[in-house]
Structure formats: structure tokens, C-alpha cells
Image (spheres, rainbow, N blue to C red):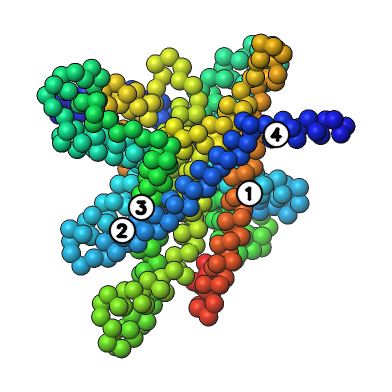
Amino acid sequence: MTDDIAFWIAYLTNGKHLTWYASFQFTIFAALLGGALAVVFGLTGATLRNSRYFPLRLIGTTYSAIVRGVPDVLFFLFFPLALEQAVEWFISSQICTPESIAAQTASWPPCREANWFLGTTEYLLLASVSLGLVYGAFATNVIHGAMRAVPHGQLEAARAYGMSASQVLWRVHIRQMWVYALPGLSNVWMLIIKATSLLSLLQIADIVLWADRLGAPNFLPAVGLVHDDWRWRYYLVLFVFYILVTWLSEKAFDAIMRRAGRGILSEARG
Amino acid sequence: MQAFLDDLALMAPAVLFNLYFAAASIPVGFVLAIFLALGKASSNALLNRLSRGYIYAFRGSPLFIQFFMFYSLALSLNLTVWRPLGISGFVLHPLFMGPLVLVLNTAAYTAEIFYGALRAVPRGAIEAARAYGMSGPQQFRRVVWPNLIRLAWPAYTNEVVFLFHATAIVYLALPVVGGQKDLMITAKDLFERDFNAFLHFPVAALYFLSVSLVVFFFFGLIYQRLMRHLPQPPRIRFVPRWMR
């Protein structure tokens, strides 16, 4: 019995498993940065949609409509690849000589010097930005709705105090908007958490990739079959992990909403 | 321009796979969701707990993980269960596994929508039905259900569009069999051939966008028909909201 326990503790803390536990940092980092960027893009998008100038309004509406009309995976894959290509194209237009273009055999990039190598860090940053862009479109919608939910009297009172337009926006409108936006933003946050499972599509060795590697049938020539296909157990762990994270975020958002809604109409707490 | 038209033609067969996944899972998920919603609203403690837990688990975890989990579970049962029964080729085929997981997933989301609508059914209407002496099933069929589906329809439309979008990750999690590629895989393969990200992905996006608009149009028509008793039928909003 104690031998069994000792064995399992040893097995679950071997090098590969430790790498798996460490890879949770990628998921958490992408979720946090992606969430923060989503709020930034959401605020930008909502401000654009509220703008007085038609072209800006058009940009805001198109952004939120197009990105939400397309699957998140597609945009999630498209944005990093497209950005990488755009940068490589720009570099190649600067440094490529006719000789180096002629020497290049692959179809992309135009010359070998223009290749921009992306490692895990770069991909992680790009993945966070694309999470922010995709879910920023959802947040745009939420924040746009919340800005319209702020009572008009508050803005009129602010204007009556002689505040300028930008003062009204920053000191009154956006400050009061949060209470109405929180229920929607909590939904967007749940979507972002779930989308972090897609990181492995960008060649980041994240929790999903490691679960697959650890669970795959393990055969060593010296000992024979160590274990057969255990992948579903590892995925079950991830399944439970994501449910726990969702549960925790729900609790956290409830607490934030209760705190943010102090002294404000109870309907705002949603 | 020619390359764009070529891409449109190349992806036309691919969109059929996405449509198949959505069409195969939506009806089953719809029926399953009704039972789950009733279970979540039921006073039977066991039924209530089970459906609550199911809905929470499947709404709280990524579809991507669910795909991997169920597929690897089916794989590990292959030697002991599917092979002796002689159905392993069928069970492990993405055209079966894909809709299976999508059904499990969409049933949970749809059940949550139906549950919300169920709680919004006017109390008075149910009391009136009871006062008329209707039995339980009669009440459900004649009073609760018509109210429920009208309340839930706009949100359900969003869910259907999201499910269609979710079909994009089926083949990213399951193996591609032969030439059976959906939009995402086709776009990825084309990209890996000539590295033209700005052409292939937007064309795939265009397909997703246009199918979404068609779904919105037809579900809007159904909504107008459901609401035909009102003097001015409300119109469904034309953009997906943050429902999921």
C-alpha cells in the first residue's frame, strides 16, 4: 500500500509530469493577457462605435460584426500567421537582394534573411493578442450596451458641472459603465478561458499537448509496455481543471459584482 | 482574382462537412436539451442534481478538450468493446465522433437557454391550464412548450450559429480520414502549400459568415411565424451576441 503510494507520487513527479505542470503557466498567462487586451479592445471598439464621425463608427461596427461572425479558431489561427507574413514581407522589401531571392527555393519568405523565427514566447504573445482581438469584439458589444445603460441624468449632471466631453467620458461615463458591463464581461471571460485550450494549435507546448504526450502508449524496449493508452485520463484531468477554473471565476465575478454594485440600483447587478 | 475564385471552388465541397456536422447534431441536441432543461427544473433531487451537473460541466469546459477526451476514451475501449462487436470503424470515424461530442456539448448550452425560458413562462398561464383540469403532459404540450420556444428562439438561433462555428475545430481534434476535409483543414492545407494566409483564411471565413447569415435569415422567418399572433412580430437581431 505505502509502496503503491510512493510509486504514484514518484510517477506523477517525474520530469515529464513536472514539465506538464509548468506548462499551465502558458494557459494562465494567455488567459490573463488575453482578458486584459479584450477589455482594451472592447473599450476602443465601443468608443469607436459611439463616435461622432461616420468612418470611425463604421470601423467599430465592422470590427465587432465581422470578428463575431467568424469562428474564433479561424481568427485565432489567422491573426498570428498573417502578422508573421506581413512582417516578413516588410523585412524582405527592405533587405532582400535579387541574388538572395534567386537563391531561395521555398515559396515563402522571398529570401532566407527575411525569415522571422517565432518561438514559444512570440507565439504566446501573438496568441494572447489574437484572443484579445477576438473577444474584444464580444466585449465591444457588451461595453457598448453598458455605456447606453448609464442613466442620462448622470451625464447631464456632469455636463452641467462644466466638464468637457472627454472629462464626462472618462470621469463619469466609463466609471459608471462597469457595473452594467460586468455580467457580460464575465461571460466573455468564460469564453476566453475556454479558448485558451487552443494554444497547442500555435505550436505552444501547453497543457493539452503535454496531456497528449504523457498519456500516449508508453513503450520502452527494455521493459516492454509501461502503460497503454491513458490519454483519456489526462484529458479528464484537464476537463475537471477547466470546470474548476470556471467555478472559481464565477465566484470571483459574483464578489466583484456585489462590491461594484454597492449603492447602485439592484437591477444593475444582473 | 482567379486565385480567389479557385479557392471558392476548392472550399465548396469542404463546407458540406461543416454543414453535415451541424445538421447531424442540432436536432438530437435539441431533443436532449428539452429533457435536460426539464430535469434541471424538476423537483426530483437526483434528476435535478444530474442535469445541473451535466449542464455545468459541459458549459464550463472547452469543446476542444471534450473532443480529445471522448475520442481518446473511444480509442481506449477499441480493443475490448468496439473491435469484438465489429463496429470500431464506425465508432471511431470522425463523421460519428464529431456529431456525438457536438450533441453532448450543444445539448448543455441549449438546455441552459431552455431552462431560462422555462422559468420565464408566465405563472398565470400555467395556473390557468391547471384550473382547466389539464394533466401534466397536456399542460406542457399546450401551454408551457409554446411559451418556452417563443421565449427561447432568439437565444437558440445564436446557439445554432455558434455550434456551426464550433464545427471548425472538429478536424483539429479528430483525425482527417482520406479527403474528408472541412473548411479549416482545407484552408490550413492550402496555406501550407503556398503560404498565402491573406487569401485562404478569409475565403473560409467568408463561407462561415455567409452560412451564418443564411441561418439567421431562416431562423428569423421561423421566429416571425412563431410570433404571428402578435400585431407586429418582433424581429430577431441579426448579429450573434455574447450568449455562450
| Chain holding disc 2 | A
In the picture, the disc for residue B200 is none
Which x, y percent locates residue A94?
15, 36
Q: Nearer the viewer, residue B184 or A10?
A: A10
Which sits earlier in the primary sequence, circle 1 or circle 4?
4
Helix, strand or loop under label 1: helix
Q: Nearer the viewer, mark 4 or mark 3?
A: 4
The residue at which mark 2 appears reads as: A45
Identified at 23% across, 21% down, the residue is A107
Helix, strand or loop under label 4: helix
- B163 to the left or right of B100: left
The residues tagged by marks 4 and 3 sit, at their Cα atoms, a distance apart of: 41 Å
Residue A139: quarter of image: bottom left
User: Label 1 amino acid?
Assistant: Leu
Residue B228: quarter of image: bottom left
The residue at which mark 1 appears reads as: A244
The residues tagged by marks 4 and 2 sit, at their Cα atoms, a distance apart of: 46 Å
The residue at which mark 3 appears reads as: A137
Identified at 58% across, 57% down, the residue is A250
The quadrant the N terminus of chain B occupies is top left
